[in-house]
Amino acid sequence: MKSIALIVLFFMTLGGCVYTTRCTPPPSNSMDGPVSLVVLPDNVLYVINSNADSRYCSSFLSEISLSDPRQPSYNGVIPITYKGANISLVAESYFSPSTGQLWITDRDDNRVLLFDTSAHTITATIPVDQNPISIAPIGTVDGDIWMLVCDLSSNDVSFVSADQLKELYRVPLTNNGADAAPLNAVVTPSPVVINNQPPDRYAYITRAADNNLSVISINDHCEFNPMFPSSASVPVFNTVTSGNIATMSSVRTYNCQTKSELWTASFSPTTADFVVSGSVSGKMKKRALVGVPYVSDNGYVGFTIFAPTESYATGDNFTFSTTASSGLISIPNTPGTGVGTAPAVTRGIVMTPDMQKIFVSVVGLDSIVVIDTSNSSVENYIKVGKTPGAMLLSPDGSTLYVACYGSEKIYVIDTSTETVTNIVGVGNGPFAMALSPDQRELYVLNYSDNSMDVVDLANFTVVYTLK
């Protein structure tokens, strides 16, 4: 249980480390609370350190040479400071090859840091909401580079601009009250079609509060429901006319845009059967009683249908009540998938290059959940070790690496068969991973013992450990 407490504490802690004026710079060959790593051009790797033990004056970067990819060595360290001020608590990062900037989330000061890797300095900051925990690339939008930031404590996500150096949009995650706690996100690289909606790009977001995924429309900058993208809301039928025809006014959500619509319903004068706009059919009763939910085949309208005991006649008035749609993909807590080591919460997330599958690590179930993006349904559970967290997908999408924080192992998964093919023992608290430039080595950061393991992917063994 100690490992679970450590990882939960790291993600949910709102404040940073407390520093005094009597602090020391980090040694040139050190790591402390390593939380993220990126491989840069010219055989250089940066480890982002959160300064977990509060031993040093600030968070810092460990610069590591990959001249020998199998035996990395320290080049030195770079304190993370801005305008003379030390920065106490950082989290995940993303390197933008096109700009040469390293984006780092600053949890204490609620901002994103833009670090120039050639000048070794922070050139700008972008304020966001409370406790930014992770950052994911959206891509180029109208010539501007956008990023998506998960704001852990304020239950929302921020769209930020590299060119404008500001937060463009803030999208609240409203479907789970005040406890969404967004952790990590993955964004579709190109528009996709879901449930006959117009092509759109989506961000899928894991949550520290539960075993759901939130879904954000990139085009409309709002939370989106992939299961039922359109839904009616308390539609009201008017009087049935002599031709057994009635109209229904309703509100429909379409790619996050709310629109009023007018539906037409026709009725059998004897059996109470009905058809709405030629696509929804069933039976209903004039006076609302206990009913059963009914969702149309096209996913656009949800009604509550009541058992027919009376026929409709000209002049009757009546109403439909509707089913509510949530904006989440829910991952069932399926018996047998986990060992109950912690509450079921979604943690890491990756998407295959063809955008057909999403893999989600679920803490508590000790499983990787596979989601079919075409219908947002759970396809499979892949059992792994304790407390699965960070994941890394090979560039071709064929292999998934899973860091299991609680079992000190890396699980290797064949994404085509969705089976575990290898298990590699590593250091204490594996937290983040990266591939070497030639993809022959896997670098694994171990948060709890401040080390980095080098895994030979030819035989799946640790061949070197940097401390």
Image: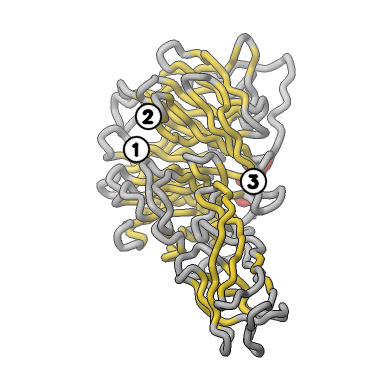
- Of the numbered discs 2 and 1, the one sitting upstream in the chain is 2
What amino acid does circle 1 point to?
Answer: Leu
Kind of element beneath mark 3: loop
Q: Residue furthest front?
A: 242
Report the residue at 59% width, 71% height from top.
Answer: 246
Closer to the N terminus: mark 1 or mark 3? 3
Residue on which the image places disc 1: 435
Give the CA distance from mark 2 to mark 1: 8 Å
Estimate the x, y position of residue 197 in percent, counting from the top left. Answer: 43, 53
Q: Residue at x 44, y 11 (%)?
A: 119
Q: Would you call the spot at circle 2 few (<14 residues within 10 Å), some (14-19), or many (20 or more)? A: some
Q: What is the spatial separation of the Cα atoms under label 2 and label 3, in whole angstroms?
A: 28 Å
Tell me, yes or no, whether the two marked residues, 2 and 1, touch with CB atoms within 8 Å: yes
Q: Earlier in the sequence, mark 2 or mark 3?
A: 2
Location of residue 42 in the rendering, given as x and y in whole percent from the top left corner: 30, 21
Of 335 and 405, the residue lying toward us: 335
Q: Nearer the viewer, residue 26 or 385?
A: 385
**Inter-mark Cα distance, 1 to 3:** 29 Å
Q: Which residue is mark 3?
A: 181
Given the image, on which type of amino acid does mark 3 rest? Ala
- Tell me if residue 130 comes above or below residue 29 in the rendering: below
Q: Is residue 220 visible?
A: yes
Q: Measuring from the top left, give residue 457's x and y in whole percent.
A: 29, 45
Q: Residue at left 60%, top 56%?
A: 251
Question: Which residue is label 2 attached to?
Answer: 39
Q: Secondary structure at mark 2?
A: strand
